[in-house]
Amino acid sequence: MSIDLGASFGEVTVIIRNQLGQDVLKSSLSFLSLFEVKIPVAAGLYFMEVSSGDKSAILKVVKE
């Protein structure tokens, strides 16, 4: 899955959590505006938190 942030950010943290709120993936990336994420777990519903500095967003992701 490709994520386009729309602008370049210095440091970006990506956390993917399952429906129980458990972290299944945590990654820190630097100086980017577009990145690829592969969810290394079973099919299901996940929540992806993308944050940089004081900005953050939570996306609902369905892995098939």
Image (spheres, grey):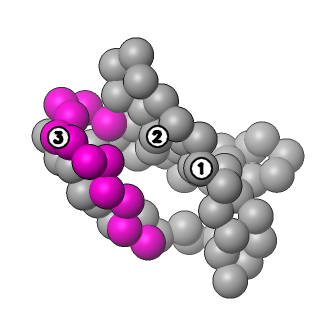
Residue at disc 2, secondary structure? strand
Residue in the picture at 21% in, 35% down:
9
Q: Which residue is mark 1?
A: 59
Q: Amino acid at mark 2?
A: Val
Residue at disc 1, secondary structure? strand
Q: Amino acid at mark 1?
A: Leu
Asked whether 58 or 43 is in front, the reply is 58
Mark sitting earlier along the chain (3/2): 3
Place residue 40 in its image quadrant. bottom right
Looking at the picture, does residue 63 appear above or below residue 25? below
* Alpha carbons under labels 3 and 2: distance apart: 13 Å
* Alpha carbons under labels 3 and 1: distance apart: 19 Å
Region in magenta = 1-12
* Left or right for 54, reference 34: right
Looking at the picture, does residue 57 appear above or below residue 48? above
Residue in the picture at 42% in, 64% down:
37
Looking at the picture, does residue 16 appear above or below residue 52? below
Q: Are marks 2 and 1 in contact (CB under 8 Å)?
A: yes
